[in-house]
Amino acid sequence: MKILNIIFFLLIALLSFESKAQSFEGTIKFKTEIETYNDEKNEFKKELEERYGDSLLVSFSKTGILKREYLNSSYLGNHIQVYNPAKGILYLRGKNSLKLDSIDVKTNSIENLISKKKIASERILGLKCECYEYIGISKYNDTVVLNYCFSKKTPKINPLLFEKHIDFFLYDYFESSEKPYVRFIIKTDIFKIVQTATEIKEKQIENTTFEIK
């Protein structure tokens, strides 16, 4: 009987581990909206729109690889970012560029966290969503506000897959929510970028999707 009890508890522990290990695999498409301040001729706004495009496709693998593809950005705008969870490195390539850059995201570029709190809920994709707001000071001494919104009805994210992505409080957000974000906002004194999900698809992602081309 004692042996049976041990086996029973081992099975429960294994099932619990497998449940915790599961992570969302699929894509989320976002529309991108940009606002600038003290920009009378909208020159800076145009520059940001050319850099970020009008939408973003984010692909999540079940192993923690994350890919952002900027859609309809300009000839010299952003193209692809790929996060390597084993190294804690974000690889970047611009449009029409052969140069591959990288950022170590194990360090937060927003060095001083002033506050983290839940803010008013939103409706996104027809779902009630909760939001976390982070306010901090960047390494350039600018005040930066970040918002991440999520729905409890979307698939689960395993936060441990992102434990090396400290930058922009991404790991902290995933640890708090265990959900993919469906709205991301970054706001400074001179601009605001809002990325809002327009569709979310849970599906198997081919490994070649995460290649930087």
Image (cartoon, helix red, strand yellow):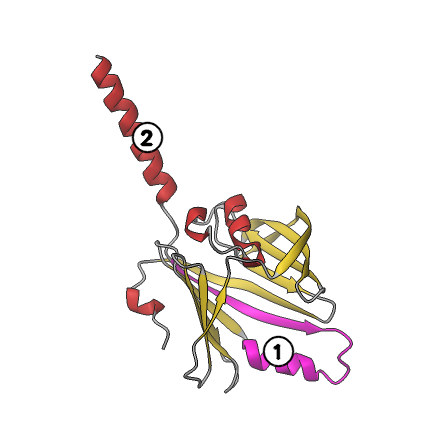
Q: Quadrant of the C terminus?
A: bottom left
Is 157 positioned to the left or the right of 5 in the image?
right
Using residue 171 as the reference point, say whether residue 82 is left or right of it: left
Element under label 2? helix
Determine the residue positioned at 51% across, 51% down: 171
Q: Is residue 42 left or right of residue 82?
A: right
Which amino acid type is marked by label 1? Leu
Determine which of the numbered discs, if any, sits on residue 125 in the image.
none
User: In which quadrant of the rendered image does the N terminus lie?
Assistant: top left
Give 128 or 133, whichever is nearer the viewer: 133
Quickly name the residue at label 2.
Answer: 13
**Residue situated in front as seen by the camera: 100 or 62:** 100
Check residue 48 in the rendering and tell me which mark sits there, or answer none: 1
Q: Residue at x 67, y 62 (%)?
A: 138
N-term mark: 1 or 2: 2
Amino acid type at image mark 2: Ala
Residue under the image location 74 percent in, 67 percent down: 189
Q: Quadrant of residue 97?
A: bottom left
Answer whether residue 212 is visible to the viewer in this image: yes
Residue 137 point in image, percent of width and height: 69, 59
